[in-house]
Image (cartoon, rainbow, N blue to C red):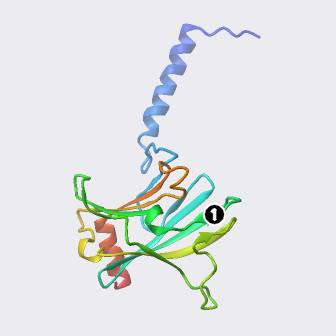
């Protein structure tokens, strides 16, 4: 068996590789992402980061407070601390991507009641191998909620003490939030 690679073979395979790389960029919705900092661009979608999964289900307001319904899946053998001021940041970005408003302090978190009407025992830590759903309350959000041309940025940092650089980010266009609120009546 011959392992020689002729100039003609080299050019043929180089051309095929170039076409494949160029064609991959034509696929809609494809973009290169940092696996340590995934970015989700739609409400109701989630992803995983290591052994932790996150899903931003909804964004609502109660008076002046923003209420973010968030689901976390802990696939680790260790509990996850659920201290809102350490693990969540909420920002509103203008059309150029600059921060118009942000809040990462005075946040509160409540466990979503189960079907039995009781709050599950998932605070202040989400136990190992558990899924928890929470309402993250963000003061003063309603007065700064994104306009259709703005973007909401919701950041979740699963382990800020050990790995503050690892995060899951949702960047939801303001126009999508307006549509979502119109369809739900909120």
Of residue 184 and residue 29, the one placed in the foreground of this image is 184
Q: Check the image and report above or below for 159 versus 109.
A: above
Q: Would you place residue 165 above or below residue 80 in this image?
A: above
Residue at image point 29% right, 81% down:
64
Rendered view: 142 above or below 52: below
Percent x, y of residue 28? 42, 49
In this rendering, would 137 be left or right of 45?
left
* Count of numbered circles on the image: 1
Q: Residue furthest right?
A: 1
Front in this rendered view, residue 144 or 7: 144
Which residue is labeled 1 in the image?
A: 74
Q: Where, quadrant-wise, is the N terminus in this rendering?
A: top right
Residue 94 horizontal/vertical position (percent): 23, 58
Residue in the picture at 58% in, 61% down: 53
Q: Looking at the image, which residue is at 22% across and 56% down?
A: 95
Q: Position of residue 19 (x, y in %)?
A: 46, 30
Q: On the rendered structure, is 29 left or right of 132? A: left
Percent of width and height locating residue 42: 42, 63
Few, some or many residues within 10 Å of mark 1 (<14, 14–19, 20+): many
Is 34 above or below relative to 124? Answer: above
84 relative position to 181: left or right: right
- Report the quarter where the C terminus lies: bottom left
Which residue lies at the image location 69% right of the left edge and 65% below the top edge?
128
Pick the residue in front: 177 or 159. 159
Label 1, secondary structure: give it: strand
């Amino acid at each position: 068996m011959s392992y020689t690679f002729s100039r003609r073979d080299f050019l043929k395979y180089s051309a095929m590789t170039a076409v494949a790389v160029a064609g991959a960029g034509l696929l809609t919705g494809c973009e290169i992402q940092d696996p340590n900092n995934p970015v989700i661009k739609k409400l109701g979608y989630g992803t995983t980061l290591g052994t932790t999964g996150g899903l931003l289900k909804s964004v609502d307001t109660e008076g002046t407070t923003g209420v973010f319904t968030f689901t976390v899946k802990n696939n680790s053998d260790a509990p996850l601390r659920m201290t809102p001021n350490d693990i969540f940041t909420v920002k509103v970005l203008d059309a150029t991507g600059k921060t118009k408003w942000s809040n990462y302090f005075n946040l509160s978190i409540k466990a979503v009641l189960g079907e039995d009407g009781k709050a599950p025992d998932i605070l202040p830590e989400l136990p190992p191998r558990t899924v928890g759903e929470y309402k993250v309350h963000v003061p003063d959000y309603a007065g700064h909620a994104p306009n259709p041309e703005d973007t909401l940025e919701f950041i979740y940092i699963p382990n800020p003490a050990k790995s503050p650089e690892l995060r899951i980010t949702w960047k939801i266009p303001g126009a999508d939030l307006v549509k979502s609120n119109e369809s739900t009546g909120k």
